Image (spheres, rainbow, N blue to C red):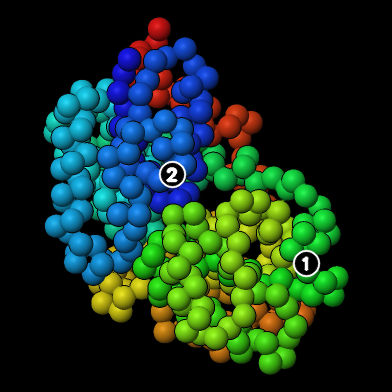
Amino acid sequence: MKNILIVAAENSAENYGSKIIDQFNLSDRKVSFFGAGGDKLRGKGVELIVHSRELSIVGIVEVISSILRLKKIMNNILDSCRKKRAAGAILIDYPDFNLRLAKKLKKAGIPVYYYISPTVWAWRYSRIKIIRKYVDHMFVIFPFEQDIYDKEKIPYTYTGHPLIPSIRINKERDVFRKGLNIRDEEKILLLLPGSRLSEIESLLPEMLSTVKKLRSQNKFKAIILKADNINDEIFKKIIDSSEVEVDIINQDNRYDLFNASDVALASCGTSNLELAVSGLPFVAVYKVNKLSYLLGKGFLKISLYSIVNILLKKQVVNEFIQKEFTAKNCAKAVSTLLNDQDKADEQRREFLGLKAMLSLKSQPSEIISGKLISLIFGNK
């Protein structure tokens, strides 16, 4: 039996990690997983050293203010690795924490396998030096990342994007809408404020202000898609203070919800790809602590923020970042998508090329688990 560390600190990372564990369980290799994650990983039999909610931090200033707590968590993970004689570590995304952890793991003699490359192509390219020194093998999800790792001579495997095979519609649009008691003429505005507590506290109030502004001229149903790792009371507190009528729906059947909706207002992040591949027009927003933004801006190598725009190499989706993220700006952009079918269809046409761009014949989890088994157990 080999013990393997897995660190999946965010909701999307936990979904990807769960699929890798499923593939390991289908093999004849005896492994036991432990590490950082949420209830989904626990349900897969992972022994949690730390729950993902303790790692829900975004922004440079926020990370700095939590540095002592994060250091303690990191030391607890390392102690567990030593006690369990970890055969390897699978670190998924979350670079500000995981790259630091990679350094400590490598020094402790534990091989490091990293899934979803830090966005060195977008900002802080200097992190590539850390990756070269402390990561044994990288798994990349975007085709253009291959050029970077070839150039830097860092071992990697291209997996395709893990979202693509998981985006499936189980219920027809009309059937799902009836289940939500949505009238035929009623449109749905979907709000996706992120999966981190700091994102929700930063983004949701202005999103709700957008809903309030839109309701003066539009009839629609507003629904918040809630991340599994966030307590309902947090949403209810923000909603109550805004005095806006809005429903909350959990992650279950999220793609059916995308298919049933008409437009989304979403934080920049993984959800942007999900929306695009699902064919749901959306507006992208983001805001962090002002100091975090000013400190990070100097490291940026890109002018676009939504991964959809980055991949398409043009602004297909409206982006409102920092001071541009206002209810007035968002309401105007969302209203256009709600009321101008040509504009909404224009986005959908642009989204069609993304799925083909990011797909491979094999499932990403199959590619990753196969490579990891080879690296950890040898080619037996």
The number of numbered discs placed on residues in the rendered structure image is 2
Read off the residue under disc 1: 181
Type of amino acid at the residue the image marks with label 1: Asn
The location of residue 125, given as percent across then percent down, is 30, 54
Percent position (x, y) of residue 52?
35, 50
**Residue 154 visible in the displayed image:** no
Q: Residues within 10 Å of mark 2 (few under 14, many from 20)?
A: some
- The span from disc 1 to disc 2 (Cα, nearest Å) is 30 Å
Three-letter code for the amino acid on which mark 2 is drawn: Asp
Number of the label disc, if any, that sits on residue 165: none
> Do the residues bearing badges 1 and 2 touch, measured as CB atoms within 8 Å?
no
Q: Position of residue 328 (x, y in %)?
A: 56, 89
Query: What label does residue 39 carry, if any?
Result: 2
Q: Residue at x 39, y 65 (%)?
A: 197
Quadrant of the drawing holding the N terminus = top left
53 vs 251, left or right, is left
Rendered view: 336 above or below 166: below
Q: Which of the 4 quarters of the picture holds residue 260?
A: bottom right
Percent position of residue 254, x then y? 63, 54
